[in-house]
Every structure is written in structure tokens, then in C-alpha cells.
Image: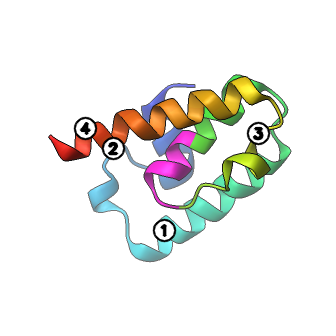
Amino acid sequence: MDFDDLLVRYFATTDLAAVSPAMLEAGVDRMLVDFGLETDRARRFALWSLLFMLGHAPDLDVAFAEPADRDAARNLMDLLDRHAED
């Protein structure tokens, strides 16, 4: 999944600064539904990643059955945390 495609699909723009609070909430709600229905691991991870960046990701033990997916999510969280510190 391409990041810009996800933004357009759920928020109708690639500029999140232009998204109203109501649009953001509606987009996140749709993403959570799609995340719950998604069976492809890579697509599921992409959705979780964007949800995490927006502060709405489900907990890792709920989101991912595979330990490798949980480890990848932890790695992403660590990378984003390190980037925020810089």
C-alpha cells in the first residue's frame, strides 16, 4: 500500500493539515473497520502503521497474531520515537 493512496482513500487528500477534525474521525473509523476485516498481513500492517501515527492503533497483542508482525510494529515505534527525539 502506498502512503499517499491510504491518505486519499481515507481522508480524500494527501495533506492531513487540510483535514477537518470530523473528516479525521470519520477516516480513522473507516480505517479501523478495514483493519479489522483485512486478512493480508502486509496491508494490515500498513493500516496499523498509519493508525499508530494518528494515535489510534490497536494494541500490538490485539492487532497482530504473528510474533514477527508485533516485532516489526515495535521496530516502527522505536524508529518513530528516535526520529521524534532528533
What is the C-alpha distance between the residues marked 4 and 2?
5 Å
Tag 4: residue type? His
What colour scheme does the image use? rainbow
Tag 1: residue type? Met
Identify the residue at the far bottom of this view: 22
Q: Which residue is mark 2?
A: 81
Task: Tell me: residue 56, above or below residue 44.
Answer: below
- Residue 64 is situated, as x and y percent measured from the top left of the image, at 76, 39
Mark 3 touching mark 4, by CB under 8 A?
no
Which is more toward the observer, 6 or 48?
48
Q: Which residue is mark 4?
A: 83
What is the C-alpha distance between the residues marked 4 and 1?
27 Å
Q: Nearer the viewer, mark 1 or mark 2?
A: 2
Q: Nearer the viewer, mark 4 or mark 1?
A: 4
Instruction: Please state the extent of the stretch shown in magenta in the rendering.
Output: 49-55
Which is more toward the observer, 22 or 45?
45
Q: Residues within 10 Å of mark 3 (few under 14, many from 20)?
A: some
Q: Which residue is mark 1?
A: 23
Mark 4 touching mark 2, by CB under 8 A?
yes
Seen at 48% across and 60% down, the residue is: 55
Q: Which mark is residue 64?
A: 3
- Residue 73 is situated, as x and y percent measured from the top left of the image, at 57, 35
Tag 3: residue type? Phe
